[in-house]
């Protein structure tokens, strides 16, 4: 059977795209462990590179792959609801630290969106790109919904999420050492707030305490951004 005919046959069912995704994920995790878990090369980045290379080699268009694998996004709904669990588990910490959290979270979450938008705007990026990177520090289930509301591209957003998470996992530890910050609660909160799920995974590698506060930061950032960003975007657009 010719290669093109074989590819057409395989891609006729969504199971092929789903299988490619799962295979890339499993192989990415395996390579990540074999490489002794480098912070600058997380498993999800390895999996994404492997998947992209595979699509290029076999000649499967990205649009076809995305359409076939789109049913996986159904899992984003339960994942969004599950974000309530870290909040419930960390209620004692929230009560104990509600004052610094109340002050820190809005400022940090706003800056996380604004610095990327400012850089992109200075470089002359289009409104589509600006709308696609605004929620780059929010966990994917919430970020996709925000991006769709403000008219961005989910594909561009996912790329921005990956880059942001990898950069956060690599640089938060370096910044903490430079600033001589040893409190795992602060480090974890910064990882979750800026690096969403990828940063949270990195925080759990540091300690359970860092992981718990990363989950807290990721959850609160998602809620705050989902409430504020679409409203702010409409007001800015109306003002323009």
Image (tube, rainbow, N blue to C red):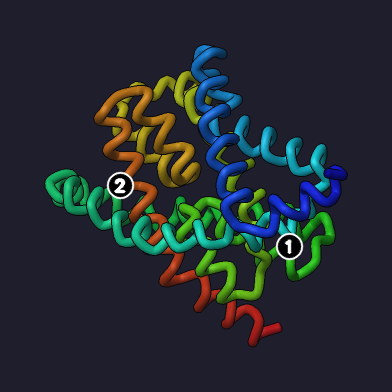
For label 2, the residue is 216
Say few, some or many: other residues with alpha carbon within 10 Å of mark 1 (under 14 / 14 to 19 / 20 or more): some
Give the vertical position of 28 relative to 36 (above or below): below
Which residue is depicted at the point 41% across and 34% down? 201
The first of marks 1 and 2 along the sequence is 1
The quarter of the displayed image where residue 114 is located: bottom right
Q: Residue furthest bottom?
A: 238
Q: Position of residue 231 (x, y in %)?
A: 50, 78
Q: Position of residue 140 (x, y in %)?
A: 50, 55
Which residue is depicted at the point 62% across and 49% down? 16
Whether residue 117 is visible to the viewer of this picture, yes or no, is no
Whether residue 225 is visible to the viewer of this picture, yes or no, is yes
Q: Relative to 201, is 211 on the left or the right?
A: left
Which residue is depicted at the point 60% across and 57% down? 14
The quarter of the displayed image where residue 27 is located: top right
Q: Position of residue 7 (x, y in %)?
A: 77, 48
The quarter of the displayed image where residue 57 is located: top right
Secondary structure under tag 1 reads helix
Give the vertical position of 230 relative to 60 (above or below): below
Q: Relative to 142, is 92 on the left or the right?
A: left
Mark-to-mark CA distance, 1 and 2 = 28 Å
Q: Nearer the viewer, residue 12 or 138?
A: 12
For label 1, the residue is 129
Which residue is depicted at the point 54% across and 35% down? 25
Quarter of the image where the C terminus is located: bottom right
């Amino acid at each position: 059977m010719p290669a093109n005919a074989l590819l057409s046959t395989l891609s006729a069912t969504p199971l092929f795209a789903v299988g490619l995704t799962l295979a890339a994920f499993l192989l990415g995790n395996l390579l990540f462990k074999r490489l002794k878990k480098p912070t600058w090369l997380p498993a999800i980045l390895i999996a994404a590179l492997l998947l992209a290379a595979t699509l290029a080699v076999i000649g499967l268009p990205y649009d076809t792959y995305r359409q076939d694998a789109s049913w996986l996004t159904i899992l984003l709904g339960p994942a969004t609801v599950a974000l309530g669990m870290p909040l419930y588990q960390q209620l004692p910490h929230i009560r104990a630290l509600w004052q610094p959290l109340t002050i820190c979270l809005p400022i940090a979450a706003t800056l996380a969106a604004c610095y990327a938008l400012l850089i992109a705007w200075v470089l002359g990026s289009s409104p589509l790109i600006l709308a696609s990177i605004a929620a780059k520090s929010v966990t994917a289930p919430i970020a996709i919904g925000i991006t769709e509301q403000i008219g961005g591209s989910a594909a561009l957003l996912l790329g921005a999420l990956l880059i942001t998470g990898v950069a956060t996992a690599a640089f938060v530890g370096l910044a903490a050492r430079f600033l001589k910050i040893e409190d795992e609660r602060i480090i974890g909160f910064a990882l979750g707030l800026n690096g969403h799920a990828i940063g949270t995974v990195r925080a759990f590698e540091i300690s359970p305490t860092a992981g718990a506060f990363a989950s807290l930061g990721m959850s609160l950032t998602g809620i705050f951004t989902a409430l504020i960003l679409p409203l702010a975007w409409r007001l800015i657009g109306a003002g323009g």
